[in-house]
Image: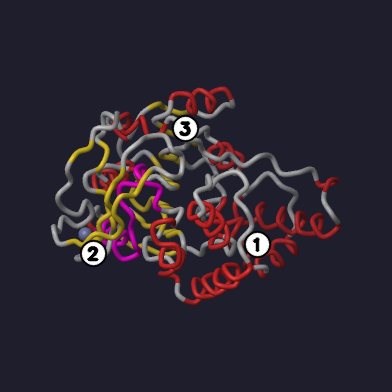
Amino acid sequence: MIRNEPVGACPVCGSPAREPLHRELPDDTFRAVPGTWTLWRCQACGSAYLDPRPDRATIGLAYQRYYTHAAGPAPAAAALSWRGRIRRRLEDGYLHQRYGADRPPSPVGAWLYGLLLPYRHMADVLHRHLPGPGGGRTLLDIGCGDGAFLRQAQACGWQVEGIDPDPQAAAEGLRRGVQIRTGGLETLAQREAAFDVITLSHVIEHLHDPAAALADCHRLLRPGGQLWIATPNIDSGGHALFGRHWRGLETPRHLVLFNEASLRRLLREAGFRGVQRRPSQLPEPFMLARSSQALAQGLPPHDAPPPLAPALRRLVWWLALQGWLRPRRREFLYLVARR
Ligand SMILES: [Zn+2]
């Protein structure tokens, strides 16, 4: 059984001022554990957090049915339509030039793909907005799962390392040739100024002490090194629309949900500077809306949730447009910061 622990104050800013945001939230995403939780909104910084929440010793139970999606290999060019083949050619040129990917170079393709913003933004998110080709620089991915991103970064010239609490995922990564340690940041306690880039993809919202994790990242980065964070945005249009059924809540695995201001604040307090927002992907509001609609209907949200109802689809187009114009309403936050 999950054992809950009291929290009492905001894990981001320490303020006890709060109001309930959603009560009696179950684990409706993976249905791994019984029970319900209350999500509170901090009145000082706008973050949301569970209180009480699963303690460190038992939260592993909530991950028994959890899986990380690994993107499969891209389909062979011959299997694509003519439009798909043209897009692939442009994408190859862009990824080669921008990230040093092992793809056929094409300066014209790189330039054209750069103009196709929705596609370019998807490619950039998949490459976590890395600062150029690796060129032998070092990269750490925290919560790396089976290491799919590490392999991709390796192919772009980065020297990669990963950590993940799941021993099975780590074993799978080792089998495929990337170095993964089993555990959390404590496994790197002896290291400092060791990495040029650290990435945290949908990890920080799972941590009991996000401030301590960011302090560890700051120590582990070389001066001038870059931290990249992706996490759901509690101020998103999708949360406003779907409320307690919004896929981003993922009770009880998401312990803290940030908005852009509160994540920026935590980064600054950990000593980071030059915090910048990076563009998100156009389809994100649709992806989350389909999962959220499934949750609202009592269905599991993964694999292939039903298509959006027509009226909802129009609303989500509006959300996507709004997210384009008002970045603080986007579904996910993508921030980079420098040590
Ligand atoms: Zn707060």
Q: Residue at x 26, y 29 (%)?
A: 57
- According to the image, label 3 marks what residue? 65
Query: Left or right: 211 with respect to 200?
Result: left
Q: Of the numbered discs in the image, which one, if any, rests on residue 119? A: 1
Answer whether residue 144 is magenta in the image.
Answer: no
The amino acid pointed to by label 2 is Cys
Contact (CB < 8 A) between labels 1 and 3?
no
- Front in this rendered view, residue 253 or 124: 253
Disc with the residue nearer the chain's start (2 vs 1): 2
- Front in this rendered view, residue 208 or 100: 208
Disc with the residue nearer the chain's start (1 vs 3): 3
Image quadrant of ligand 1? bottom left
The 10 Å Cα crowd at callout 2, few under 14, some 14 to 19, many 20 or more, is many
Residue 197 seen by the camera: no
Rounded to the nearest whole Å, what is the CA distance between mark 2 and mark 3? 32 Å
Which of the 4 quarters of the picture holds residue 124?
bottom right
| Mark 2 or 3, closer to the camera | 3
- According to the image, label 2 marks what residue? 45
Q: Of the numbered discs in the image, which one, if any, rests on residue 160? A: none
Query: Left or right: 61 with respect to 281?
Result: left
Q: Secondary structure at mark 3?
A: loop
The amino acid pointed to by label 1 is Tyr
Q: Which residues make up the magenta segment?
A: 249-268
Residue 77: x %, y % from top left: 81, 47
Rounded to the nearest whole Å, what is the CA distance between mark 1 and mark 3? 32 Å
- Front in this rendered view, residue 201 or 323: 323
| Mark 2 or 1, closer to the camera | 2
Disc with the residue nearer the chain's start (2 vs 3): 2
The 10 Å Cα crowd at callout 1, few under 14, some 14 to 19, many 20 or more, is some
